[in-house]
Image: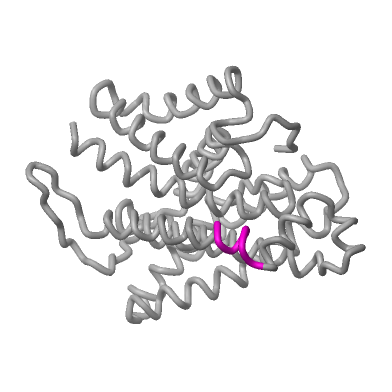
């Protein structure tokens, strides 16, 4: 039982980390990026390319992946968001879905359909606490999620640039009037969102391999987590991700793994009926 809970918390931390990247972009432009999962997949394959094919040190591979994901985030903004600014929000959402499909198929063309192994900084090392066995990589996932959550909260609430992003999200026209460079601000938000997706890809790939189709399911789980936690709430995303991971793992262990995904979406629908603003969301109309 305790082993299942630990495994569920590890998966939940991955969900939370993907949702943090999703919310980074949402908190800047009030648009849900449904290609966030495919950006995660790109991060995983960048890790595979640099660590396995190029045989670079893991620390250097991580740095290159983050830099590449920042560039990809800006390109993504220029392709999927900026040409459609001011248009109905559903057009941007549909464009993010289309770009995600394109990214997935490009990876299939270049790397093929077979999953690829990505090494962990800690190899296969494990830590045992009584009857519970935890891999060091899972502990690394917990630590990385905590650090990234704290860093994101500090950036959004304690830095000038973070306040500029929040002001841009509230009223883009007013932000321009007070001297905020809206285009640069939005670009930084997309860069950070893509980098968080890349971090999630590097963390999840050693557990489940780098697969060209991995982004679809994980991206949808991030959306479910964001809905349950409350769109815009970083703490809500982390708590909802951990809870969802535990519930899914327990359901797979005691009922059937066939119901794992079904339970996630049933929980989301239940929240939409009972508490549509999520655990920590505010009662207000949002374009999601």
Seen in the picture, residue 198 relative to 49 is either above or below; the reply is above
- Which of the two residues, 254 or 110, is positioned nearer the viewer here? 254
The answer to if 114 sits in the magenta stretch is no
109 to the left or right of 92: left
User: x%, y% of residue 233?
Assistant: 58, 44
Q: Residue at x 32, y 64 (%)?
A: 118
266 to the left or right of 243: right
Residue 76, quarter of picture: bottom right
The answer to if 155 sits in the magenta stretch is yes
User: x%, y% of residue 95?
Assistant: 72, 49
Of the 4 image quadrants, the one containing the N terminus is top left
User: x%, y% of residue 271?
Assistant: 55, 23
SS majority, magenta: helix
Magenta stretch, residue numbers:
153-159
User: x%, y% of residue 124?
Assistant: 18, 61
Seen in the picture, residue 188 relative to 229 is either above or below; the reply is below
- Which of the two residues, 236 or 124, is positioned nearer the viewer here? 236
Q: Residue at x 69, y 68 (%)?
A: 160
Seen in the picture, residue 42 relative to 37 is either above or below; the reply is below
Outermost residue, right side? 177
Q: Residue at x 36, y 77 (%)?
A: 59
């Amino acid at each position: 039982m305790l082993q299942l809970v630990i495994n569920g918390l590890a998966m939940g931390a991955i969900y939370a980390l993907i949702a943090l990247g999703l919310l980074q972009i949402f908190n800047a432009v009030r648009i849900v990026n449904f290609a966030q999962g495919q950006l995660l997949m790109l991060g995983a394959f960048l890790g595979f390319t640099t660590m396995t094919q190029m045989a670079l040190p893991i620390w250097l591979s991580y740095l290159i992946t983050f830099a590449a994901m920042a560039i990809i985030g800006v390109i993504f903004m220029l392709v999927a968001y900026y040409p459609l600014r001011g248009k109905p929000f559903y057009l941007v959402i549909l464009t993010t879905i289309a770009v995600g499909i394109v990214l997935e198929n490009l990876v299939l063309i270049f790397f093929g359909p077979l999953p690829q192994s990505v090494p962990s900084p800690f190899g296969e090392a494990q830590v045992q606490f009584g009857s519970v066995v935890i891999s060091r990589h899972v502990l690394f996932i917990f630590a990385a999620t905590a650090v990234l959550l704290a860093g994101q909260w500090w950036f959004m609430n304690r830095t000038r640039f973070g306040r500029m992003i929040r002001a841009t999200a509230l009223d883009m026209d007013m932000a321009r009037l007070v001297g905020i460079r809206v285009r640069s601000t939005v670009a930084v938000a997309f860069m950070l969102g893509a980098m968080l997706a890349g971090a999630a890809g590097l963390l999840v790939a050693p557990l489940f391999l780098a697969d060209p189709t991995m982004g679809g399911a994980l991206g949808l789980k991030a959306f479910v987590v964001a809905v349950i936690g409350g769109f815009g709430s970083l703490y809500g995303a982390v708590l909802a991700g951990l809870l969802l991971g535990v519930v899914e793992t327990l359901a797979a262990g005691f009922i059937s793994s066939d119901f794992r995904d079904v339970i996630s979406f049933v929980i989301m629908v239940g929240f939409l009926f009972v508490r549509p603003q999520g655990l920590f969301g505010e009662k207000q109309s949002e374009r999601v």
